[in-house]
Image (spheres, coloured by chain):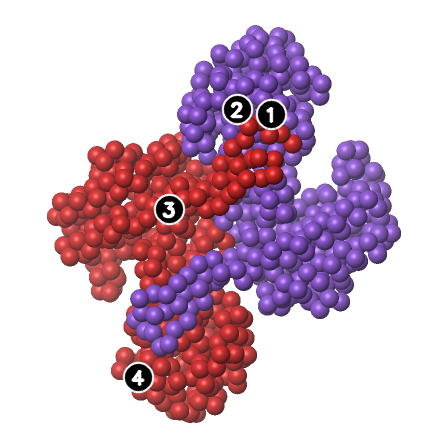
Chain colours: A red, B purple
Amino acid sequence: MSYTEELGIRAKAAEAAAAGASTLQKNNALAAISKALIANKELIIAENAKDIVNAKANGMTEAKQDRLKLDEKRIEGIAKGVDELIALADPIGEIIGGGCRPNGLQIIKTRVPLGVIGIIFESRPNVTVDAAALCLKSGNVVILKGGKEAINSNVCLGNIMRKAIEEAGLPADMIQVVDKTDRETTTELMRLNGYVDVIIPRGSANLIQAVVKNATVPVIETGAGNCHVYIDDSADLGMAVEITDNAKTQRPSVCNAIESLLVHKDIADKFLPLIAERFKQHDVKIYGCDKTISILGDTVEKSTETEYATEFNDFIIAVKVVDNIDEAIAHIRKYSTRHSECIVTSTLENAQKFQKQVDAAAVYVNASTRFTDGGEFGFGAEIGISTQKLHARGPMGLTELTTVKYLINGNGQIR
Amino acid sequence: MSYTEELGIRAKAAEAAAAGASTLQKNNALAAISKALIANKELIIAENAKDIVNAKANGMTEAKQDRLKLDEKRIEGIAKGVDELIALADPIGEIIGGGCRPNGLQIIKTRVPLGVIGIIFESRPNVTVDAAALCLKSGNVVILKGGKEAINSNVCLGNIMRKAIEEAGLPADMIQVVDKTDRETTTELMRLNGYVDVIIPRGSANLIQAVVKNATVPVIETGAGNCHVYIDDSADLGMAVEITDNAKTQRPSVCNAIESLLVHKDIADKFLPLIAERFKQHDVKIYGCDKTISILGDTVEKSTETEYATEFNDFIIAVKVVDNIDEAIAHIRKYSTRHSECIVTSTLENAQKFQKQVDAAAVYVNASTRFTDGGEFGFGAEIGISTQKLHARGPMGLTELTTVKYLINGNGQIR
């Protein structure tokens, strides 16, 4: 039996207990995890230090080392995140619909866990705890495969959580951390049909594409965000500057930040200098079309198809002046990853047209794309932001980690 | 550009019109399809006759030839099925949820089409029309790839529908029928990421597994049904006979028919002869465990793991006598394809235990598994029965052919 198959068998063996656990049991287990994280702070920091030593030896950038690092404050933050899940409503057992059929059959549509969830992720070790806690609260079993650069941290966090939930009366195998770092193990995990019900990749576009290509288990794609803001000719220019600046610079590394700015030709002369002034404060590098360059001058580099298609995740933006809203929508249809798109306008007709014709998980009128987030949407927490259309679209909270089961009660009905 | 890529480009070009079509436009198009099918009866029968000639030449069984055949009555039935969709509620545009966030942002969760749906199916040409009509009503574009044995019928039906919807003012490319029959085209279709949003295979277990293995586009698995009935010791034996007989013999070729019968040891002596008597009327071949053989005698062949794991789709059943409900549930967990499972019991505790612990799309108490069907569930129509947990589980109606879109309205909100 292979290593991953063993993981799968253990996960499936824990499935019934996970699905049958009461909300109280699951909340107790979450509290136990949070407490154990705090109690084991020193151990976590010591194991994390090994990863940092390796990272330095391997020449990892300072920025990436910072994302990898766990200190007392960060561990407290992670534990607090687990505590916050306790207050959230348990989706399991919710009755979603149903009724009585003419023949007297009662059909009840109810919410049940997905089963076994595989999470494949990179670098930040906090994902290990966040994802495990969300899966636990939603009655799912989880197999976590993190990046090799965080292996010591991840295994340590996994062991602490396993011990904690076991002491709280749930099977330790509801949470398993893959302690191998080779590529073959990851590929096997994506192909564990019969054991794993869904794979959720979290990380770079490369990671996600590798999973989509190689998995035979159903996948939920997350995170790719080539997002746009379009400034209509009727826009309030002050509002347009604030929204564009916020969507680009408040946290450029995340998927709901914008990568491109589209501006109606009739206001480009006024608006572009205003936003360029603001971008200067954050040293935002601007690529632009010929019209953009003619307005903003030589500091702007010429944008090609490549820039319009790139998710920079950085203080970089591609700008295009468009003739009208139709050209803006056509551009977005061509380049968008269908994550979050925004129009700034004061024309009702254009607002409606944009929301109807732009195909994305979240389509904004007069607000920053940065709000596409489980917390901001009021879900309490999120496991990722789905950019596919199947199963879940947009921020995925606890509900998105469930499926349905029809309970059918009769008294001898036959066809 | 490849043949399939061209299909994909055409489909995407029709997507906005399909998504934006009003319910009235879509209903008019459905009425036009129905009318055109009736008006072109002779043409359809003539094209279908070519398929039947080929089928005979290739030695297809009479039963399969019958499934392939289209006559006047069947065409009228297909047209009637299209007409019936007109009366169903349009899921597109439904507001599913939302509200106002503390910062004043209004979030509206609304239902939109999936986009482009690829349907890969076998033999029966009525699927061409059924699937196309369901996709049309739900605002989706469809690419239909049927089996090579029905190619003349499928292409003919496709052309009639395309012409009809075009005359009704919608793009013909909302419905495309693949007119190539080679395996490469099918594989390419499953890998048309960026053009196709979901693939739904309909047909044999082999077809479905080939799609699951080779597709990179998200797949909804349908149809595999290794379903069980468990007769508890507290069961009303008269009801147990009716349900078991109905679930096995009323239409054994479909996925919601049972393949195995589990019987509590305390009632096996009484129940097995009763059901065996009934099965004799349909010449049902019985495989059984040693206890079954000791009760029913030598006409029963010994059942191995293979029989318990087989979806016969025929007048064949595998029987096992179990010690208690726990053994029954464990057997079901091991062999079930998680489609439809049934307990016949008069004990509340066992009914609840069975519905809680058995993991399947539909879990029945005292009713035949044959009710797992979009029509019987009151959905009006179905595109298939999902046996996976992601996106849709159980019968899939119009709603299951949709995804969501968040419309977010602000007045300058930033983070």
Above-or-below relation of B368 to A196: above
- Give SS at disc 1: helix
Q: Is residue B116 left or right of residue B356?
A: right
Q: Which amino acid type is shown beneath numbered disc 1?
A: Ile
Do marks 4 and 1 share a subunit? no
> Which residue is at a point 27% across and 38% down the rendered structure image?
A25
Work out how far the residue at label 2 is from the one at label 3, CA to CA, in angstroms.
29 Å
Residue hosting label 2: B344
> Which residue is at a point 80% across and 58% down the rendered structure image?
B36
Decide if residue B35 is in sight here. Answer: yes
Identify the subunit bearing mark 2: B
Work out how far the residue at label 4 is from the one at label 1, CA to CA, in angstroms.
73 Å
Identify the subunit bearing mark 1: B
- Give SS at disc 2: strand
Residue hosting label 4: A278
Q: Nearer the viewer, mark 4 or mark 2?
A: 2
Work out how far the residue at label 4 is from the one at label 2, CA to CA, in angstroms.
71 Å
Identify the subunit bearing mark 3: A
Q: Is residue A230 left or right of residue B401?
A: left
**Mark 1: few/some/many CA within 10 Å (<14, 14-19, 20+):** many
Say which mark, if any, is on residue A91. Answer: 3
Q: Which amino acid type is shown beneath numbered disc 3?
A: Pro
Say which mark, if any, is on residue B243. Answer: 1
